[in-house]
Image: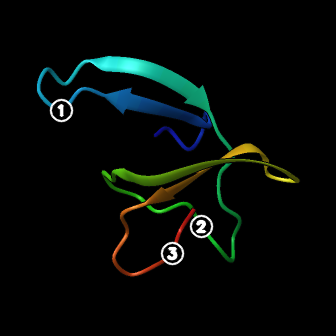
Amino acid sequence: MNIDTKQLNVIDLDTKEIIKKYTVSTGKDDTPTPIGDFKIIQKSQWCGSFGSRWMKLNIEWSSYR
């Protein structure tokens, strides 16, 4: 993910090729966007102030979504 451009890239782990790109929201000062490589472990559709989609990442130290 590129925090500056708010772009999340889905990458094929075998070929390292970008499969899809998404525009996403990023964290705030008190809840910053985590840096690193993560896997999406849960997805959901919903209607709310954050948009129409929700993804949970495999971050051991947080329940970051």
Q: Earlier along the polypeptide chain: callout 1 or callout 3?
A: 1
Left or right, 51 with reference to 63: right
Q: To which residue does mark 2 refer?
A: 32
Mark 2 residue crowding within 10 angstroms, few (<14) / some (14–19) / many (20+): few
Where is residue 65? Give x, y as percent: 57, 62
- 18 on left or right of 62: left
Q: Secondary structure at mark 3?
A: loop
Q: What residue sits right under mark 1 in the picture?
A: 13
| Corner quadrant of residue 9 | top left
Decide if residue 57 is on the left or right side of residue 36.
right
**Residue 5 sits above or below residue 31 on the image:** above
Q: Measuring 46% from the left and 63% from the top, which residue is drawn there?
A: 34
Where in the figure is residue 49, as x and y percent of width and height?
88, 54
Query: Mark 2 or mark 3, which is nearer to you?
Result: 3
Measured in 3D between alpha carbons, the distance from the residue under mark 2 to the one under mark 3, in whole angstroms, is 13 Å
Q: Which residue is found at the position 37% from the left and 69% from the top?
A: 59
In the rendering, at what x and y percent does residue 58 appear? 36, 63
Determine the CA span between mark 2 and mark 1: 26 Å
Residue 8 against residue 43 in the figure, above or below: above
Residue type indicated by callout 3? Ser
Mark 2–mark 1 contact, CB under 8 Å?
no
Residue 63 image label: 3
Amino acid type of the residue that numbered disc 1 sits on in the rendered structure = Leu
Q: In 3D space, how far apart are the residues under numbered discs 1 and 3 (Cα atoms)? A: 23 Å
Nearer mark to the viewer, of 2 and 1: 1
Q: Which amino acid type is marked by label 2? A: Pro
Q: Is residue 6 above or below residue 49?
A: above
